[in-house]
Amino acid sequence: MKDPYEVLGLQRGASKDEVKSAYRKLAKKYHPDMNENNPLQDLAEEKFKEIQWAYDEIMNGNSSGSYSYQNSGGGAGSYGNGSGNLSGVRQQVQSGRFQEAIRMLNSVSVRNAEWNYLMGVCLVNMGSIAQGVQYVQNAVRIDPGNYEYRNFLNQVMNMQNNYTQRTYNYGNSSSSADCCTNLICADCLCECLGGDLIPCC
């Protein structure tokens, strides 16, 4: 695996401010939302994941040694050491295996911004939207400059507001309407991540 400093275009020993600045610039450039109509969208998405990995490695203090990583993702068994490397969890989330992702997250001792973000994404996609939002809000509080966290939080809040407004417009605020609202919102978010919670719609 590449040196995370190299991925971000930095020299080893760069300050945290330099790391954050480089990360923001590259994340904005390669974020999936910025490359929707790009014929190289898949490559941009892979680059975005690599940038996210590099940022997390540096910020979590995992970048001090020489780099000869063979596998940055790791398997489910590598999460008991609390290393804070969450790329394997991201793979589970992207595959729609949210229960497995939560199991892996619960075995990690480093509860940083990314941990909160991924836990929030899992819970939102499983229908526990209010609880998931709290985790994503924690992630934004810990790392307010992270575009990915803010973007996801805004999407969830906008969808919640839109569906809540529709519910009130129809004059129906029953618990069954709230349940449907939450399911539709979760399905939309799941589809954004490449899954499908409700196949019929």
Image (spheres, rainbow, N blue to C red):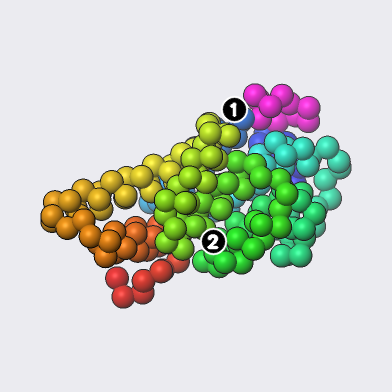
Kindly identify which numbered label has been placed on residue 69.
none
Q: Position of residue 116 (x, y in %)?
A: 58, 46
Few, some or many C-alpha atoms within 10 Å of disc 1 (few <14, some 14-19, many ≥20)? some
Q: Main secondary structure of the magenta part?
A: loop
Identify the mark nearer the N-term, 2 or 1.
1
Question: Vertical placement of 120 versus 64: above or below?
Answer: below
Q: Position of residue 118 (x, y in %)?
A: 56, 52
Q: Position of residue 135 (x, y in %)?
A: 52, 46
Question: Vertical placement of 11 versus 149: above or below?
Answer: above
Residue at image position (29%, 70%) is 201
User: Gap in Å between the C-alphas at discs 2 and 1?
Assistant: 26 Å
What's under tag 2, amino acid-wise? Answer: Gln
The answer to whether mark 2 and mark 1 are in CB contact below 8 A is no
Most distant residue in the front direction: 174
Residue at image position (60%, 45%) is 114
Residue at image position (86%, 41%) is 65
Per the image, the residue denoted by label 2 is 94
Few, some or many C-alpha atoms within 10 Å of disc 2 (few <14, some 14-19, many ≥20)? some
What's under tag 1, amino acid-wise? Answer: Ser
Q: Is residue 129 visible?
A: yes
Q: State the image quarter where residue 21 is shown.
A: top right
Q: Position of residue 78 (x, y in %)?
A: 77, 60
Per the image, the residue denoted by label 1 is 21
Residue at image position (75%, 29%) is 11
Nearer to the camera, 38 or 73: 73
> Quick one: SS at disc 2?
helix
Indicate whether residue 82 is drawn in magenta. no
Most distant residue in the bottom direction: 200
Question: Vertical placement of 28 versus 101: above or below?
Answer: above
Indicate whether residue 14 is drawn in magenta. yes
Q: Which residues are magenta?
A: 10-19
> Quick one: SS at disc 1?
helix
